[in-house]
Amino acid sequence: MRAKLTYALTAAVLVVYFVLVGSRGVLLIETGTPLTVTFGVAVLILPVIGLWFLWKNTQFARKASRLAAELDAEGGLPVDELRRTPSGRIDRDSADEVFARRKAETEDAPDDWRTWFRLAVAYHDARDTPRARKAMQRAIALHDGKQPEAA
């Protein structure tokens, strides 16, 4: 729940920032000189890109959360079996062992979104965020019945 609140607060701050930046772009355009109009249009592009990025990330987080809830209802969420250091960080060798198992499961059932979801969690635990995101995107695509892109 804390992560959701943090995400919502961050998103709200970003939206306020985008509105402020957009208003500056409008003010530049209203000045009317060719230079300020050019800068104003350029400034307006930034909030548009930012809002698109925020929207796509919010959709991704909601879909991943929906998959987690469905997997939890089925009793298939991965159990946290990772060893931790005294400071609480995940032991790298432990994460690698779990990752190897999850990768083998995914290779045995490449069309099952559940194995891709668990692989995404293993990638995340191994601190490989880009691959975790790709694996989760594949799980979402498989769950939604879409043809996933080649990994």
Image: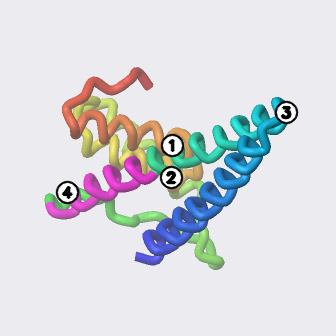
* Separation of marks 3 and 1 at Cα, in angstroms: 26 Å
- Specify which label sits upstream in the sequence, 4 or 1: 1
Q: Nearer the viewer, mark 3 or mark 1?
A: 3
| Neighbourhood count class around disc 3 (C-alpha, 10 Å): few under 14, some 14–19, many 20 upward | few
Few, some or many residues within 10 Å of mark 4 (<14, 14–19, 20+): some
Looking at the picture, which amino acid does disc 4 mark?
A: Glu
Tell me the CA gap for discs 1 and 2. Answer: 24 Å
CB-based contact (under 8 Å), mark 4 and mark 1: no
Q: CA distance from mark 4 to mark 1?
A: 27 Å
Mark 1 vs mark 2, foreground winner is 1
Mark 4 or mark 3, which is nearer the start of the sequence?
3
x 56%, y 41%: residue: 130
State the image quarter where residue 112 is shown: top left
Residue type of the residue flagged with mark 3: Leu
The residue wearing badge 2 is 124
Tell which of 73 and 5 is nearer to you: 5
Callout 1: SS? helix
Does the image show residue 105? no
On the image, the x and y values in percent for residue 66 come to 26, 56
Contact, CB < 8 Å: mark 2 with mark 3? no
Numbered tag placed on residue 70 in the rendering: 4
Front label number (2 vs 3) = 3
CA separation, marks 2 and 3? 46 Å
| Of the pair 91 and 46, the residue shown nearer to us | 46
Q: Which mark is residue 35?
A: 3
Q: Which residues are magenta?
A: 58-73
